[in-house]
Image: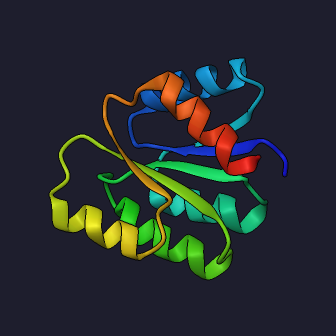
Amino acid sequence: MTKRVLIVDDDRQMVRTLSDVVRLHGWEAQGAYSGEEAVSSVEAQPFAIVLMDVRMDGMSGVDTLRAMKRLRPGIHVILMTAHTPGDVIADAEREGARHVLRKPVPLPALVEMLDAIVA
């Protein structure tokens, strides 16, 4: 599986930082800054993994996850959150999120998780 990851967050600095980190570990990274943009990206090209914030303006991460799963049922999605209640996290897991990580994201653990998914 190609090591391509789509990083989705409405915080542009977060997208840049996470993209830089995964690139240092051999991943090809693309950024998106909204759920709508992420769905379009997934529709246009395959990604091994999507790493996405739960809380964004417009489409939430969970709504975006649902839309992505309709387009590409086998897509691997890892969600990130700083302020999300447990019921939203449970909903994300029911919808097929591989993991829900708390922000700040532990970078070494994130890279290990990405590598394990494509192994």
Q: Residue at x 44, y 29 (%)?
A: 14
Q: In the image, 5: left or right of 1?
A: left
Q: Work out whether 51 lies above or below 62.
A: above
What colour scheme was applied to this rendering of the protein?
rainbow
Q: Work out whether 23 lies above or below 46.
A: above
> In x, y percent, where is residue 94?
38, 75
Among all residues in the image, which is located at the extreme right? 1
Q: Residue at x 20, y 53 (%)?
A: 84
Based on the displayed image, in which of its 4 quarters is residue 81 positioned? top left
Q: In the image, 81: left or right of 25?
A: left
Q: Residue at x 68, y 72 (%)?
A: 74
Q: Residue at x 65, y 65 (%)?
A: 75
Among all residues in the image, which is located at the extreme bottom? 70
69 or 10: nearer the viewer: 69
Q: In the image, 19: left or right of 57?
A: right
> In x, y percent, where is residue 77?
54, 58
> In x, y percent, where is residue 111?
59, 30
63 or 92: nearer the viewer: 92
> In x, y percent, where is residue 69?
58, 75
Q: In the image, 5: left or right of 3?
A: left
Q: How many marks?
A: 0
Q: Work out whether 70 lies above or below 46.
A: below
Q: Work out whether 56 lies above or below 31.
A: below
